[in-house]
Image (cartoon, helix red, strand yellow):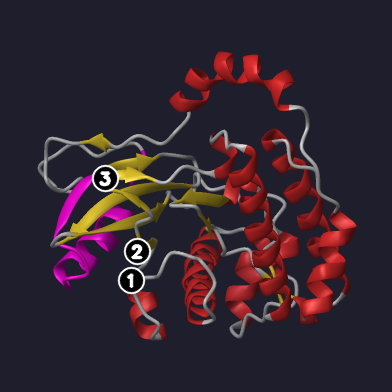
C-alpha cells in the first residue's frame, strides 16, 4: 500500500473537516425514561412489536434505563440503554412492512429452513414469511456476534444469549456492547479522517479481520469502512447478520471477492492504496 501526497490533501482536509464531523452519530435524548412507554407518543422508528420486545428485555433485567437514540434508519434504529453504569446498544429492527429485504437472496445461500410452510411463506414474501425472515435475521446476527466474539474477533459482545431460547425471546432487538466513549458512539471509519500512521494501522487491522473471517470459514458479505468502527486505535466489526459460510461454494467465493474490493476502495479516502488480490491471497495463506 502507499499514501498519496499529504500536502495535496491538506487544504481539502480543512475544508471538509466540519462537514465530516456533522455526519458523526449524535445521541438524541428523550424527556421520558422509556421510549416505548404507553403514555407517550410512539416514535416513527418503532412499532408495537419492537416496544414489546424492548419492554420484555427491560422486565428481565437485561437493562434498566433508556438513555437516547443513537442512529435512525429505515431498516433499524439503534438506541443507547443502560444497565447500572454500563452502556449497551439496542439495535431495534423496524416494522417488517417497512423493511425491504431487497437483493438479499445471496445471503440465504445454503441456509436451511426446517419448516416447509415457513420457507414457502418467506419465498412468497407474505406477511408471515417476512416476519419469520426478520426473526431469523435477528437470530443470525446474535449467532454470528457470539461466534466471532468467542473466536476473539473485535465485535461488540452480545448481551443476550448464547442460548437459542434467550435469543428467540429478544424478538426484533439485538442488544450488545456499546462501542464508544461515555454516551458518544465510536465513529465509522467512513466518517473519520485519519493521519497516515493511523490509516495504515486501520487498514492492517481490517486485513487481519478479513483473514480471520476466512479462517473461520465465513464471509462478511458487506465489508467496507461503513461497517467498521474506529475506537481507541482499534477497528471494530459491526453488522454481521448477512454472513455466509464459505462452505456454500461459488456464491460465497464471489462474496469474498466482492468484500475485498470495497475494503480497498473505501480506504482510498484515507489515502491508503491496497490490492484486492493481495488481500485474498493473504487471507487464504493464513487459513
Q: What's the residue at 20%, 45% (across, down)? A: 35
Label disc, if present, on residue 175 of the rendered structure: 2
Q: Position of residue 36 (x, y in %)?
A: 20, 49
- Sequence-first disc among 2 and 3: 2
Mark 1 is surrounded, within 10 Å at the Cα level, by few (under 14), some (14 to 19) or many (20 or more) other residues, namely some
Q: Which residue is mark 1?
A: 159
Q: Quadrant of residue 130?
A: bottom right
- Sequence-first disc among 3 and 1: 1
> Residue 64 magenta-drawn?
yes
Q: Mark 3 and mark 1: span between their CA atoms?
A: 18 Å
- Sequence-first disc among 1 and 2: 1
Q: Which residue is mark 3?
A: 183
Q: Quadrant of residue 170?
A: bottom left
Task: Mark 2 vs mark 3: give the one in front.
Answer: 3
Foreground pick, 66 / 75: 66
- In the image, residue 168 sits, relative to residue 125, either above or below, namely below
Residues in magenta, as a range:
45-68
> Residue 130 magenta-drawn?
no
Left or right, residue 50 beside residue 98: left
Mark 2 is surrounded, within 10 Å at the Cα level, by few (under 14), some (14 to 19) or many (20 or more) other residues, namely many
Left or right, residue 200 beside residue 33: right
Amino acid at each position: 500500500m502507499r499514501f498519496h501526497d499529504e500536502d495535496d490533501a491538506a487544504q481539502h482536509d480543512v475544508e471538509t473537516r466540519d462537514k465530516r464531523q456533522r455526519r458523526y452519530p449524535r445521541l438524541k435524548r428523550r424527556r421520558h425514561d422509556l421510549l416505548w412507554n404507553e403514555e407517550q407518543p410512539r416514535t416513527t422508528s418503532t412499532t408495537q412489536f419492537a416496544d414489546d420486545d424492548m419492554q420484555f428485555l427491560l422486565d428481565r433485567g437485561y437493562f434498566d434505563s433508556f438513555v437516547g437514540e443513537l442512529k435512525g434508519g429505515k431498516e433499524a434504529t439503534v438506541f443507547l440503554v443502560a444497565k447500572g453504569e454500563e452502556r449497551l446498544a439496542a439495535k431495534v429492527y423496524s416494522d417488517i412492512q417497512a423493511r425491504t429485504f431487497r437483493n438479499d437472496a445471496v445471503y440465504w445461500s445454503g441456509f436451511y429452513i426446517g419448516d416447509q410452510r415457513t420457507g414457502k411463506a418467506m419465498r412468497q414474501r407474505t406477511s408471515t414469511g417476512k416476519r419469520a425472515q426478520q426473526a431469523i435475521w435477528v437470530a443470525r446476527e446474535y449467532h454470528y456476534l457470539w461466534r466471532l466474539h468467542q473466536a476473539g474477533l473485535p465485535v461488540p459482545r452480545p448481551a443476550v444469549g448464547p442460548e437459542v431460547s434467550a435469543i428467540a425471546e429478544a424478538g426484533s432487538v439485538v442488544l450488545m456492547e456499546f462501542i464508544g466513549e461515555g454516551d458518544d458512539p465510536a465513529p465509522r471509519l467512513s466518517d473519520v479522517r485519519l493521519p497516515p500512521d493511523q490509516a495504515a494501522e486501520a487498514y492492517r487491522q481490517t486485513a487481519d479481520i478479513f483473514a480471520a473471517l476466512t479462517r473461520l470459514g465465513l464471509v462478511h458479505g458487506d465489508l467496507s469502512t461503513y461497517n467498521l468502527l474506529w475506537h481507541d486505535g482499534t477497528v471494530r466489526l459491526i453488522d454481521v447478520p448477512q454472513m455466509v459460510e464459505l462452505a456454500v461454494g461459488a456464491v460465497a467465493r464471489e462474496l469474498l471477492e466482492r468484500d475485498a474490493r470495497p475494503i480497498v476502495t473505501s480506504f482510498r479516502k484515507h489515502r491508503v492504496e491496497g490490492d484486492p488480490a493481495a488481500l485474498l491471497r493473504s487471507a487464504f495463506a493464513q487459513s
